[in-house]
Amino acid sequence: MKNKGLALVKLGGSVITHKDRPLAANTGAIEGMAKALAGIGMPLIVVHGGGSFGHYWSVKYDMHTRPAPYDPHGVAVVHESMVALNQIIVNSMIKAGANPYAVAPPAYAAGHRPMAARIKELAVMAQNKMVPVTFGDVVHMGGRKYSILSGDALMSMLAKSLRPSRVVFATNVDGIYRDMETKELVPELRQGSSKRRQVDFKSGAGVVADVTGGMQRKVREAFKIASMGMDVVLVNGLVPERIAQAAAGKAPVGTVIRGRK
Amino acid sequence: MKNKGLALVKLGGSVITHKDRPLAANTGAIEGMAKALAGIGMPLIVVHGGGSFGHYWSVKYDMHTRPAPYDPHGVAVVHESMVALNQIIVNSMIKAGANPYAVAPPAYAAGHRPMAARIKELAVMAQNKMVPVTFGDVVHMGGRKYSILSGDALMSMLAKSLRPSRVVFATNVDGIYRDMETKELVPELRQGSSKRRQVDFKSGAGVVADVTGGMQRKVREAFKIASMGMDVVLVNGLVPERIAQAAAGKAPVGTVIRGRK
């Protein structure tokens, strides 16, 4: 099934936190995006990254996506910091009049393995005026092992199950730049087309430093989602109306990666 | 299986919050209990109630355990307030040197229905130095319906699956009083014995006002757990060493309800 009226929006760590300062939420940006999201008027699921909260601590405690017996105190601290950041976003959304409902990944995934029925439940909630707000986190993988499950990986997981009509990544830059010097934006890319090669990821074009794994990983996940047949839009969350435009299917300033139909 | 080395501890809303003031955590009591829990030195799962947080809002928004299409904004506010209270407890435990990991009920229950494999995962985490900290909450029941799943109900659900060696309820009173005037404590009750009738719940003996459903409901859940063959101890969380004593299998000041063997 394709969820025609569903928008899946990722708020990147670079736009919800100040990446240059540990444990600093960008409350101004969050408030702006919360207002934009509250006004979208269509079923919505929000995913967010860790930025200077979860990502900061996961680096301190040397934690990665690879399952391993990481320091249990580090696991506690990373998880707590992600819930703290989530609370700031949820509270902002409540103030903006939306109905957010925090959902940690174990509610719909066993480790990194998606639980299809539980993911569909998120869409049912979204169709009934609730906004599930989930986030990258450190999750239990069995025994003493834990692992980082990133917000970008969650975007692919949720998109694959729910096939939302709109998939939006909000970061702190306008989209994918063809040239970092001139900041020339690539307005559209086609998944699988030769155009992809026009963006030289390795050399740094289109690669803007981003605390939660960088634009490169984001672009890789975006292409992965586009390969499933959905359009993916990359916009600047610091100009929050672009998120609303992208969710509404309008063409905002940003980069659209057209899905393979 | 019986989890010989596992303690299941409920921190009641009456002891973690000031029930006479909305949205007021009893941070002093929480700190004391966090220290006691950090020193227990055995696998531990913590459940907490809503007190003047979740319970306060659920009353305001007229929400109950009965599944119904409650106001989505109320659902958002109740859930957020429970996560906020959970954060205070989790942070206190981290400061005390423990490794708490917040777990909302949807990680191990579909609506009110327990997911056995996921509940067992909580015990595996507990056996490996993590302390799952879960809480009564408003949960999705399908479609537009939500429902309150109380901390006391979670105690029965978790005890049934995990058969912990110690089940402890911490409230703001010493235990079950035989006589409210003299505050005479009932040190021991036997599940299914005639002694139960010595405690006149209806007349108010043993019934001390408690924001999260009252002592009466707590005692009912405690008897339910005891009927599964486990001893249940009711202690005063304001004297936190009693929680540690109860978890360690010592006889603290309080009321023990002996399980049917």
Image (spheres, coloured by chain):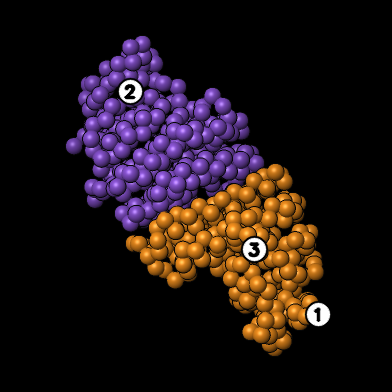
Chain colours: A orange, B purple
> Label 3: how many residues lie within 10 Å, few (<14), some (14-19) or many (20+)?
few
Q: In the picture provided, is A131 more to the left or to the right than B200? A: right
Q: Which mark is residue A20?
A: 3
Find the distance from the CA under tag 3 to the CA under tag 1. Answer: 24 Å
Q: Amino acid at mark 3?
A: Asp
Question: Can residue A124 be seen here?
Answer: no
Out of A206 and A111, give the one closest to the viewer: A206
Q: Chain of mark 3?
A: A
Query: Tag 2, which secondary structure?
Result: loop
Query: Tag 3, which secondary structure?
Result: loop
- Of marks 2 and 1, the one in the foreground: 1
Question: Mark 1 or mark 3, which is nearer the start of the sequence?
Answer: 3
Find the distance from the CA under tag 2 to the CA under tag 1. Answer: 75 Å
Q: Chain of mark 2?
A: B
Q: Amino acid at mark 2?
A: Ile
Asked if labels 2 and 1 share a chain, the reply is no
User: Quadrant where the C terminus of chain B lies?
Assistant: top left
- Which residue occupies 25% across, 40% down? B248
- For residue B207, above or below residue A256: above
